[in-house]
Image (cartoon, coloured by chain):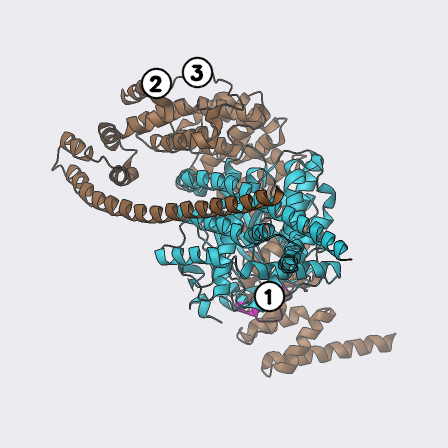
Amino acid sequence: VLLENLTALVLWLLVTVLWVNAVFLAFLIHRRVSRKRYFIIKDEARARYRRIIDQLNEGKATFESATAMLASAKLEPEIEAVHDLLLPKMESEDVTKLLYGIGSIERWARVAFGRNRCGAIVDRAMSGESNVHKRAKQEVAWLHPGRFRVTSVDRARAMSYLGRLYSPVALIFASEGLHDPAPEVRRIAMTALGRNRHPSAIPLIMEELDSTVSRGGQEISFRSARAALVSYPIQHLAAFAPFLRHKHPRVRFAVIDAIRDICQRTAATTMVTKNDFPIEIYNACVQEMVKDSYVDVRARVAGIIRYFRDAPALDALKSLMNDENEFVRLHAVRASGDRHLVDLVPSLAERLDDDSWRVCEATIKSLLVFGDKGQEVLFHHFIASESEHACEQLADELQRSGIVSSLLATCARDGHFDRTAAVFRKLTMLQKDTMLLHAIASPDLDAAIRLNVLNVLMIEPRDEVVAAVQLVAQTDSSVVGQRATALLADREQQRGYAAGAN
Amino acid sequence: MQDFFLRVFDYANAVILLYALGANAMYTLLMIASLYTVTMHSKLAGHYGHDEIAASPVTPPVALVVPAYNEEGGIVQTVLSLLDLNYPSKEIIVVDDGSTDGTLLSLISHFQLTAMSLAYRPSIKAKQPTAFYHNPEYPELTVVTKENGGKPDAVNVGINVARSPYFATIDADSLVEKDALLRLIAPIFHSPVNTVVSGGIVRMSNGCTVVDGKIREIDLPTSWLERCQIVEYMRTFLFGRPAWAFMNATFIASGAFCLLHRETVVLAGGYSSDTVAEDCDIIASVHEYLRNKKWKYRMVFTSDPVCWTEAPRTMSMLARQRRRWQLGLLQVVMKHNHMILNPKYGILGMVSMPFHAYIEAFGCVVETIGLILVPFSFIVGAMPLSLFLLLIFLAFGYGTMLSVASVLMQESTLRRYPKASDVMTLLGYSFLENIGYRQLLSFWRTQGVWRYVARMRGWEVVSKAGMGTVKAGAAS
């Protein structure tokens, strides 16, 4: 019986595998062929419909006639071609109306919200209503069929298109999308709200953020919600103000961090001053957030206060630079690296000896922002400091930022060679002299520079330095090699005297 | 006496049959799960908001750690491809692990690097760096040199030098697609749970045209050995890994291109040198650490970020590679064997680790014995024809379904081979690789098991020709 069953099993398996292989092959070939046909139709449609869109743009066709002609696209590749042509300009009002006219918006809405709800939502969106209705969120059961990807992917894609439409229209769709049972759809709706930047959507995003923080992150990611907030322009900061006093510290942190990022992005193109901030935000930052119990809030608020640039702001930054928490100090010194905050240079200099090397590193980078003034502070501190880790960090940044290279390049004609020599000397004492050793061994470098460096290196040299100088003496026949030989001879002589004296 | 041998054959053949049925059933389940996840992922691929991620200040910085040992041929191309990556904030750390060729010199001369004495503050135990190289004109790039200590040690040095919250390990002979890092970070960005590992797909560059660190033209290599490997890579990356990631039970994430959370790796003790599969070991260590701490986490696999790597071109090099992989897998499985069938580790402990231990690690021994014993048993009359046919079918025939499905999956999702003729060739190899190639792999893998048993733990070096401006397939 077993043998008979085995024979049957073999046959059954063989047939199944052959059948599955045949299905896979057929599917693959069908896909190749159908995709080829699909793209031929799409290319033809694209060429055909581009002419219509161009005519509309040039005023040679009326909106109604263009809509009627584009609506003639019935096949899937033709509709895709129309969407591809319109997609780059979907956010414009005319294109949105065009998409509405040809039925695309209704088609997407039907997929995203279902047949029953889509009519009302589309009507509301297209009626020009620009405010969202906030309604209570409903708990979604874990086994709700709408949660699963197999059912939600199409809704997510539809939401992605709806979220790119003309801002007031997209706002309605995206705000409705936040009530979808699938996190994937809500995430896309959230991104759309961020792209949309309508102030009335801020409470909705905050509600999602609150839900993410309170429910332990089963829904939309904290980063996605924060990214949506960061997209807003600085003109809408007033809408953030009510959430600065949110009971949950992570929400306060998200708001503060979003404001900081908005300011930073704006400052890259225009000057940000305290006049750009609503008074509620100014007061909250300078008076309350600097003392917030949550470290992340205190840390991130420094990045906002830096733009206020008045006496209370400078005092707040100074106090944050002296905060007990390393992370807060780190952010405060980073925020203080601003050419308009030159009064903070002495406070920054104090942080060069911070116990944390990260704070020290950030301080150096901030001081470098102040140009020559900051560099002078760094040189002075580097030469004078006895803090090993501060000096190590300074040596690190002096090399990385190219300062040592420029000191090397200019040391032969620099009027301040004493200071340069002292920097080189300190680098040698810290055994951070790789660049200097490399310089004396580089025949392409100016001889005067190499001689200067050689002289500094041979003041109480350690064995590795002596070995490097010996190599120069042996291999270099120029004036540098001769000087190296002379310095080595002097050293031997001194050692001989010292041995004799002993 | 004859009865005794017949009984032994019976038992052995029963084990082989059970193994073959179990393994193929498991592969079929993985295939179904992968078809679902990869299809869903590709349907939504254009809607992950990569542009938003690239522009967002919320996107976390990433350190790209490139351990390099004697990679003179391809290291510059690799670094160029990394510098060109579309990512808002990245640092590139090349760790020269005591190369004896011109790896360091080629980097110094191409990027005009200067030796510097930089600070080094290790958070993971590793050999001390001997020098740092940097050029302020390439602020993202730092080259670190150290005494040879193996790949895990080099990666640990890279982690110690890195400042970013996430790091990606990238093999020095690999090329990464421009948007690959964005695609790799996207699941981390959108995940509501702490995502500590994000793995990407690795493809073979053999046969492709590489110019300035970029794949310009995708083509198939000419030799059968490389073509069989292409089908095998597809099967590995499109089948097992998406399915395991779907169950949050990832056990292997290719070290050639994988993103990890730096602090978690540091807490888990960093990369360990006691196995030759450090990429697999770190995943198991991270799982173990986080499960013991009862922290919520995810490990994800994304089927569209692509890293191109050069696969061995000769039998001897392929044999070395597979022996090493098998040895490494065994070492990792044995090192973490307390997790096997341990309910504390969830699906990882109850399904993924037993699968990797009994089917992936030790299964090759059963396969190799079966390849000898099954025909022998049949010839001496100890096995009926039906059973013989079943086993032969399971050994040679069933795998074709998995291979064809993997070609189908790549065709319906990634479509990296635009020419129809290439796809047809791959389909042909989906059948051909089951006859000869897979049996050879079983044999080499069994040698790997033997190396484990015989305690031959050395790292077998696989030399590669390197990628250049000419067709990589002709570069040798």
- Furthest residue to the left? A60
Neighbours of disc 1 within 10 Å: few (<14), some (14-19), many (20+)? some
Q: Give the numbered dot on residue B462.
A: 1
State the CA–CA distance, disc 1 to disc 3: 62 Å
Give coordinates of residue B338: x percent, y percent.
Answer: 74, 43
Q: Closer to the camera, A18 or A165?
A: A18
Look at the image and tell me whether residue A233 can be seen: no
- The residue carrying mark 2 is A116
Which chain letter matches label 1? B
Q: Are marks 2 and 3 on the same chain?
A: yes
The local secondary structure at tag 1 comes to loop
Which chain letter matches label 2? A
Q: Is residue B464 above or below residue B331?
A: below
Q: Is residue B418 left or right of residue A5?
A: left
What amino acid is labelled 3 in the image? Arg
Q: Are marks 1 and 3 on the same chain?
A: no
Q: Does the stretch in magenta take in B104? A: yes
Q: Which residues are magenta?
A: B97-106
- The residue carrying mark 3 is A135
The residue located at (75%, 62%) in the rendering is B454
The local secondary structure at tag 3 comes to loop
Q: Closer to the camera, A286 or A171?
A: A171
Give coordinates of residue B44: x percent, y percent.
Answer: 42, 38
- Counting residues from the start of the chain, the first of labels 2 and 3 encountered is 2
Residue contact between numbered discs 1 and 2, judged by CB atoms under 8 Å: no
